[in-house]
Image (cartoon, rainbow, N blue to C red):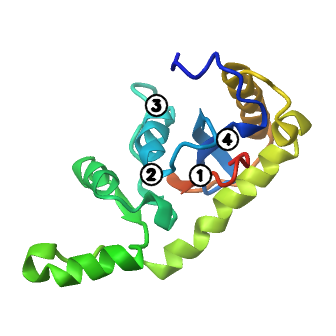
Amino acid sequence: MRPWDAREVGSQARSTLAGEGGLRPLGFVITPGQWGDAPQMIPVLEEIRVPRQAGGRPRTRPDHVGGDKAYSSRSNRRHLRRRQIKHTIPEPRDQRANRRRRGSQGGRPAAFDKKIYRRRNEVERTINRLKNFRAVATRFDKRAYIFHGTVTVAAIRLWLRPQRNAPFRAYLHPGSGGAVR
């Protein structure tokens, strides 16, 4: 349990979510509203566990990760490279300028695929499906661990609904302004 879990968070709580192509959540982390998005990427990816059909250890490494500019940081990109996870995360304008300013020491530009980046809306639609559950949308739970349980139950109900098959890709979405994301 994190130290803030027992604290009252009320409507300030928000979640950072990883969803798969079939509009179902793979993992999420509940944080206080004022926490940044980029530091939450690695804990969200660590939450992902996909069971294998033949049994054995669950998969923890998605084929591909897509995210907003909020997730473009050296530590996140380093973590994805170390785990050999392909990613499509746009580089913010200031980071591009700093890399160009450093010349050959700045490294090469991050790979970016516009076609894959367009699929970011899938995580938005996953969040909207979670918000169909009134308790998730209104965030009346006072404690973060209770809100986590509420979102978990909503996610389980989404997984129990019949869905189309989709490849194992994780899409991240940052929370904004205290919204449940």
Q: Are marks 3 and 2 in contact (CB under 8 Å)?
A: no
Q: Residue at x 91, y 38 (%)?
A: 134
Residue 38, label in figure? 2
Give the structural element (helix, strand or loop) at label 1. strand
Q: Mark 1 to mark 4: distance in Å?
A: 19 Å
- The percent coordinates of residue 114 (x first, y second) are 49, 81
Q: Residue at x 42, y 45 (%)?
A: 39
Q: Quadrant of residue 155?
A: top right
The circle drawn on residue 20 is 1
Sequence order check: which comes first, mark 4 or mark 2?
A: 4
Q: Is residue 158 above or below residue 82?
A: above
- Give the amino acid type for the residue marked by disc 4 in the picture: Arg
> Which residue in the structure is indicated by mark 3?
54
**Kind of residue sitting beneath label 1:** Glu
Mark 3 or mark 4: which comes first in sequence? 4
Q: Which residue is mark 4?
A: 14
Q: Where residue 41 appears, x then y in whole percent?
A: 45, 46
Amino acid bearing label 2: Ala
| Front residue (pair 179, 27) | 179
**In the image, which is nearer the foreground, mark 3 or mark 2?**
2
Tell me the quarter of the picture where residue 160 sits.
top right
Q: Distance from label 2 to label 1 (Cα)? A: 19 Å
Please indicate whether residue 106 sits to the left or right of residue 150 in the image: left
Nearest to N terminus: mark 3 or mark 1: 1
